[in-house]
Amino acid sequence: MNLHRISSEPKCKCLNHEIQNARLHYGRFAVYPLFPGQAITIGTAIRRALLGEVHSTCITSAYVVGASHEYSTLKGIRESIHDILLNLKDIVFKSDTLERQEGILLFNGPGIVTAQHIKLPPVVQVVDNTQYIARLEMPTSIEIHITLENTKTCTSLNTMPTTKGRFILDAALKPVRNMNYSIHSLGEGDMRQEMLVLEVWTNGSLTPQEVISQASQNLNDLLKPLLKVERYFQAKQNIHKKRMFTPTQSENLNMDQIEMIGGNKLIDQPLLPADSHLNSSLSLNIDNLVHLEGISIDDLQISVRASNCLKKVGIYTIRQLLSYTQQDLFQIKNLGKKSVEQIVIAIRKSYGHILG
Amino acid sequence: MLSINRNAGMFVLPDFKQIQIDSFRHFLTDLLRLELQRFGTIKHANQQLEFKLLGELYRLEIPKFNEREAVYQSATYSSNLYAPAYLVDKKRGIIQKQTVFLGSIPLMSARGTFVIRGVSRCIVSQLLRSPGIYYTLSVQGVYTATIICNSGKSFKLELDRQGCLWVRVGRNSKAPLLLLLIALGLEMRYIPPMIVQRTKKLNQLLLCVEDAKIDLCKRLKLKQKTTQIELGVTDPIYSLFLKPYELGRMGRLNLNKRLNLRVSEFEILLRSQDLIVASDYLVQVSNGIGSLDDIDDLKHKRVKWVSDLFCVQLNMALKKLNVAVHTNLNKMEARISRMSLKSVVSSNAIATTFFRFVASYQLSQFLDQTNPLSEIVHKRKLSLLGPGGLTPRTARFRVRDIHPSQYGRICPVQTAEGQNAGVVNSFTICAHIGDNGAIKTSLYKVCTNSMQGHVIDMLPGEDEYSTIATESCLVVANSSNQFQSIPAQHRREFVTLRWDEIGFRNTLPVHSFSVGVVLIPFLEHDDATRALMGSNMQRQAVPLLKLERPIVGTGIESQVALDSGTVITAVQECKIHNVDATQIAYVPKDSFELLYINLLNYERSNNATCLHQRPIVECGETVQKGQLIADGSATVDGELALGKNVLVAYMPWEGYNFEDAVLINERLIYEDVYTSLHIERYEAEARETNQAIETITKQIPHLNAHVLRHLDETGVVSLGAWVETGDVLVGKLTAKQSEGLLHTPESKLLQDILGVQAFGTQDTCLKVPTRGEGRVIDVRWITRDNHLLGHRKVIHVYILQERKIQVGDKVAGRHGNKGVVSRILPRQDMPYLQDGTPVDMVLSPLGVPSRMNVGQVFECLLGLAGGYLNQHYRIMPFDERYGRESSRKLVFSELYKASQTTNYPWIFEPDSPGKSRLFDGRTGEVFNQPVTVGRAYMFKLIHQVDDKIHARSTGPYALVTQQPVRGRSRQGGQRVGEMEVWAFQGFGAACVLQELLTTKSDHATARAEAPNAIVTGNLVPKPIGTSDCLGVLIRELQCLGIQLDHTMLSQHNMIQYPNLNEE
């Protein structure tokens, strides 16, 4: 389009950054100038990335000294262990590292335990010192050893530890509380441009600027595989030309699959890896190849055992199978002599091909 | 509340559990004494020994442990009954006086429940027809007088179309009335000629008394029990007719009232004169003189509640005691040497009678303890079922229907669904029970001078001839025009009257609804059936981890929470000394004594939900009497909090909310919005019988070490362990004399050499069932004494599960809008509002118009406004009394206010008020229509997928039919019913059908072969022969005219087709 009309590259500018309280940051950003239609592309993508992909550090497990299980109580403390753990789960941290960190909470009562009483390594800080944890009503003490992890790298989820008194918190604090964007049109007629205004509310673990850049980085990383796709795209086009004259069953099938991706549904059958087009068996002409592409090995009517073995190593279609030699088949785990024979006969019968 | 005359005092809603407690108090303070006094003196046959009980000086012991401890110990919460007694031996002149133990009586706790063997139970009140006489006209034109007796039995006097008088017992047996009168001993000359004339086949009747008796018994099919014959009961009429149809005191009073008789109220038996007068009146009624009765009217019914039932039981127990004392005295007479009071009185009679009664009586039910509301509603239930009442099958439509006389007494909305509809009802919030079990209601007497108006209690019959208007209309009428006509109730009809003709009005807009129903905001906009479902489903709501009060409520929430007994209030003015998660220490005013209140900490309720209390007072705070000091498991600051205010949108989303399915946001999971705690109890017991010896041990050779890892030295799971499916909770071995071992030669040799019995052991460990993983929070050893098995020990293991909401869980709102979670979407995929907030739940808009529960729309819109304004609303239903469409006006004005304060104009858009534009989270596109969005109060119900999901792999077969058993708990199969079979037939799925009808059903040999084939890796062989259920199918096909049989064909008769598969 009229690239020359845009005087400059789109830029992102922070219009507003408010810290409403320690755990509520608000930021407003403007991205402009953009061509009509681009704003919604970026806006939706960044919204989804912000809400779904930004991670932060939080407490993932805690060891409470003197507690036999979560649902017990400690003398002189107003809350049960379970209530304390729920409070710990909500504590917001600011961390410079993705690695696992340890912290300790020691407090001698009576008094109110808040987040400021957690002793942490220097790379991690508590965002809001006033976050309530527990209240000790008597001169007793409380000791909690905590583990902090970034939810992105966190591994210990959903696995209960065997050590007694160590409790897993399925913490899933999302640093982005809410996100909204609006699109504003500037100029008229051919000069129409769009401005994208992003509004981000975070919980203080990351500033709005940080989450925006982290989300963009994530988006970028997600798009990386698509940068390499160019080379194969050419090959695909060749096939496409030939197919124009012979629309086959497999094409319909492929179109179905594409539609399914668009409709956000799960695909039972994994799509073919792109590079399988290239190193296909030379003995076959390309028309046949396309034809066989969409046919599942289940159509061969081989035994379940053999077909399972093939599926395990990633052979789902006849076309994939044809790229294997008999010797290759013998290498496949659990595939014995009988099964290989069965496969070879089946292929010969149904498709008239002899495996090398 | 209303502006009610100051002099008359403020109208306060009665305590909701009072119906139970008042009754039991009446029993303990009055009836118990009366019954014990009646016990009196027992004299031995030869007048030598005399036993005397001084019943009026009875004494009840304070229970050994309180109600909670009884639950903990799996014991019974009861009190021991003592009374002083004399034993006089006249021959020797010895008088013994002693206080004897009569037995223990189960006590009702302050919450209105009983605790029997660690299980909370509740006795439901029963609504019965009062004894008396009722005149009705049947559809066939037969006039009947039904005489209902004290026991609930009834017989009828009938005037058929020929004008003959009959007495009818049961459906099929009748006899001429004259015969009965003669049998009762009335001489012919005293019988009025009217009755003699109205007798068919007079000449065939035997008019001698003795013959008449026998004839009557034959005709009415009255049969003497063999015991009575043995006892030599001579008068069959007395024992077969008069005694069973005893009127009782109340029956006599009602009979006197109806027939204008003046018979003493202590004449509790039916007399022949009564029958004559009754039949006389029956003839009069048929001639149009006198009036018929409406048998479903509440004035003809009475409530049988705890005190009545306990009184009957006590009576029975004392009779047993009487017999026991007699026999003991006899024994004592035989061997005079020892004479002691203790051996005369057995404590067994009272204890076993009461125990059996509370444990097995039909209306003594397992308390529904899902949440505080279900507890209180259960205690306020009113059932027509039970002994002397109806059965769900026989209950006609008429008795289930709402009757005008129930106004303000029985709730027209809340009842069970399905079979028990209209049979199990509920008291309204203003109802209380008066003398003789009549249900009273509070009505406001309207006077011209508003200062003289006051609240009075009305019995069911009293309000029939007065004019009752609903208060909602009165307010409107009063303000606008004095002479405006308003609807009112008069003589069981709805009429329109002038305003100044009104005598009474209801005290509250929700005066005639029950506890569950009044919690529904905007109730007046809901259809009755949906309101019914709404009130029933609130009782199934699971208490959640993080509680939240409704933004929109009716204002009754606090009283429900308070009366449910799950919260703790201060019993006296005191100063809080110390607070802890487990107890609150306080010092009462004017005292220095430190007292403690123990709090519940993650205890199990009857329905496996969690009971937990949190203190809400500060140290050093002074609290007044009745002030709230601790919250319960589903209350926040003393208000009921069963669900969560979530952002809902009414729109279709990719078909995932088709047919009441619900789409939810992932936020509800990771923010623990709908997370609940469930505590399950598992029980293991080590028995010793002569066949097998069970031992609890850690050494289980049959199992690998992994599943045994949590066991401690004694073989019981350790506290605080995280256990998963298959883990052993209690290691138990059963030693059995193994038959296989005995017969092997080497074991025989071993036995002979060592002289020991060869025992095989079997692993009978208690294991965690599927989907039962959780944290072991308690392990209890319970010691039970049993007369048969002696001293035995039972282990209870309590496992707590934290359940997040998942696909398949049922959620519901308060307006009967229920659904099942169909999909959980990440928050970025959910539709979002114009301020970027993703919605929490997407409901189907099609669920509203056909169900006619518009209240949910009002609620969710007002909730939206309240959410943005940070404000809670408590709106009494029927607010239309303040003007037309006032609900809508209120909601819109609040929405407008919210849009003004928050500066979000889209909250209230004049073009589509209450709706706003939503965006698709996946594409960022705006949906093509405005969508209703709001904050609704939604519950997670107890019907959770974890408890229900089930697939059968292997499992038992029923012994008789050899078909798979039913039910998830027994690893049962899923029934393939008639219609499912049609589906298989229709689609030609022959192989599947064959498998289902043979191998998977009752084909025992094919079933046995299947595992072998699976293990060896062969194909499962086709079954040979037919199974019985296949036989049924074949018969069915034969009924359609299809010939099914098999014929033998020799091979050369068959045409050989070339095999096409061969190349």
Image (cartoon, coloured by chain):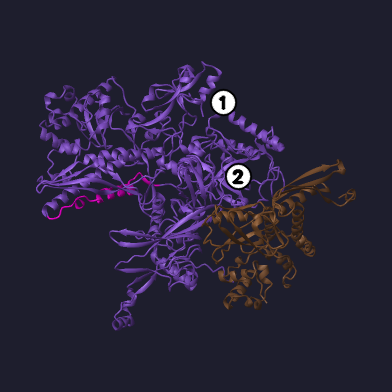
Q: Tell me: residue A80, above or below residue B634.
A: below
Could you tell me how far apart the alpha carbons at marks 1 and 2 are, in whole angstroms? 29 Å
Amino acid at the residue labelled 2: Val
Marked residue chain, label 1: B
Question: Which stretch did the figure color magenta?
Answer: B337-366
Image location of residue B147, percent across then percent down: 26, 31
Image location of residue A152, percent across then percent down: 68, 61
From the rendered image, report the letter of the chain displayed in brown: A
Residue at (46, 46) in percent of width and height: B592
Residue nearer the viewer, B816 or B612:
B612
Can residue B529 be spotted in the picture? no
Marked residue chain, label 2: B
Judging by the rendered image, the residue that carries numbered circle 1 is B882
Q: Which mark is residue B646?
A: 2
Q: Is residue B460 left or right of residue B38?
A: right
From the rendered image, report the letter of the chain displayed in purple: B
Rendered image quadrant of residue B416 = top left
Amino acid at the residue labelled 1: Tyr
Q: Is residue B508 left or right of residue A135?
A: left
Among numbered discs 1 and 2, the one appearing first in the sequence: 2
| Label 1: which secondary element | helix
Are the two marked residues, 1 and 2, in contact with CB atoms closer than 8 angstroms? no
Q: Residues within 10 Å of mark 1 (few under 14, many from 20)?
A: some
For the C terminus of chain A, the quadrant is bottom right
Residue nearer the viewer, B52 or B637:
B52
Image location of residue B337, percent across then percent down: 12, 55
